[in-house]
Image: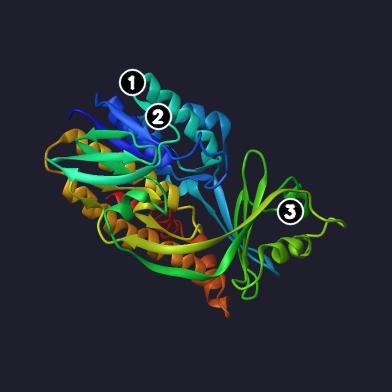
Amino acid sequence: MRRVLVAGAGPVGLTAALTLARGGVPVTVLEAGPGLAAESRASTFHPPTLEMLAGLGVLPELMALGLVARTFQYRDRRGGAIATLDMGALAADTPYPYRVQCEQSKLTPILMEHLVRHGGEVLFGSAVREVLPRGGGVLVTTAGGARFAADRLIAADGAHSAVRRALGIPFEGITYPERFLVASTDEDLDGLLPGIASINYVFDPEEWLVLLRTPDHWRVLLPTPGGTSDEAELARLAGRLRAVADPGRDWKVAHASLYRVHQRVAARFRHGPVLLAGDAAHVNNPLGGLGMNSGIHDAVLLAGALLQDSGAVDAVAARRREVALQHVRAISHGNWEKLRSADPAAHHAELRALAADPEAARAHLLRACLITSLG
């Protein structure tokens, strides 16, 4: 293969590019922004993702920056811990029976450094404008007028993918009724909520939430009405946080933002010489930390199929779409429904039984961590 283009220098695009470069394929990454994104965004790495990053030679550097979460917890807003699941149950299934908490913005510089070391290149300020499949390959024109010809193009340019739109590929699904508000805080939540794990899903029919520990902050995710202004919601954030745990003053908040959440899957993940991966191919709510992880899986498996050059690409693209529909969408949407259930008692009993049954817990973790999706 003479050259592959990758649109997008996020964790998915850079993982795909590094996979190709390590396989000896010349690769150029076209990134619309002026540099690597600095936002925290995704922050959880599941066991199979850690295995893939180990295969690319970047895991030791990520581990040095992240923290290991060996358990995660389901909690009730009023009653405290419901069940704690120990990922050690996966010890026979993976060399990494835990999740690593680390912002994706810490992974991308590592991936880029390795990519350049293997001969790849990243061109910033190169937003894709036109995509023209032709002659068994593809011609890409950027907003600045530069043209690039390649055998293949991997679109990893996010939920608003310019590549997907240029090709007219439908992106069907739903938009959730509420926005999600994410706040990063420097509070000592271990002290305010004794016994919490590094990853916590908190049930409540009126206001569920998620508490995630990262190396730099605790992150709090709260559902927020869809019809109010951002300013009004940020103004009432202090009171909402004090309702989670009250230190006798407002929480120390480092950053807060609101965003709409969608659940969508592209009609196809392959269009001639173009492959879609990550958010360009599928988006989901963040409950369960599946988006970036499944996107990295897309990247490694699709790029690996290109390296084989054996007709495997169609089968892999079809399988990745099936995973997006049957695993990622089903699990993340199910998590949303359970957290906001008007009568969560049945879910509580189910989770307590799950935690008490080692085999059932293992089966649940295999699915929740996307290990079964790779079978």
Instruction: Tell me what residue is drawn at x 66 percent, y 39 percent.
Output: 216
Q: Which residue is mark 3?
A: 194
Q: Secondary structure at mark 1?
A: loop
Q: Earlier in the sequence, mark 3 or mark 1?
A: 1
Q: Are marks 2 and 1 in contact (CB under 8 Å)?
A: no
Q: Secondary structure at mark 2?
A: strand
Viewer-side residue, 142 vs 30: 142
Q: Secondary structure at mark 3?
A: loop
Q: Is residue 229 above or below residue 129?
A: below
- Label 3 and label 1: CA atoms lie apart by 49 Å
Left or right of 257, for residue 49 = left
- Label 2 and label 3: CA atoms lie apart by 45 Å
Viewer-side residue, 366 vs 163: 163
Crowd band around label 3 with a 10 angstrom C-alpha radius: few (<14), some (14–19), many (20+): few
Question: Quick check: can you spot residue 6?
Answer: yes
Q: Which residue is mark 1?
A: 119
Instruction: Tell me what residue is drawn at x 37 percent, y 49 percent.
Output: 278
Q: Which residue is mark 2?
A: 122
Q: Percent position (x, y) of residue 321?
A: 28, 56
Identify the mark at residue 247; answer none if there is no mark. none
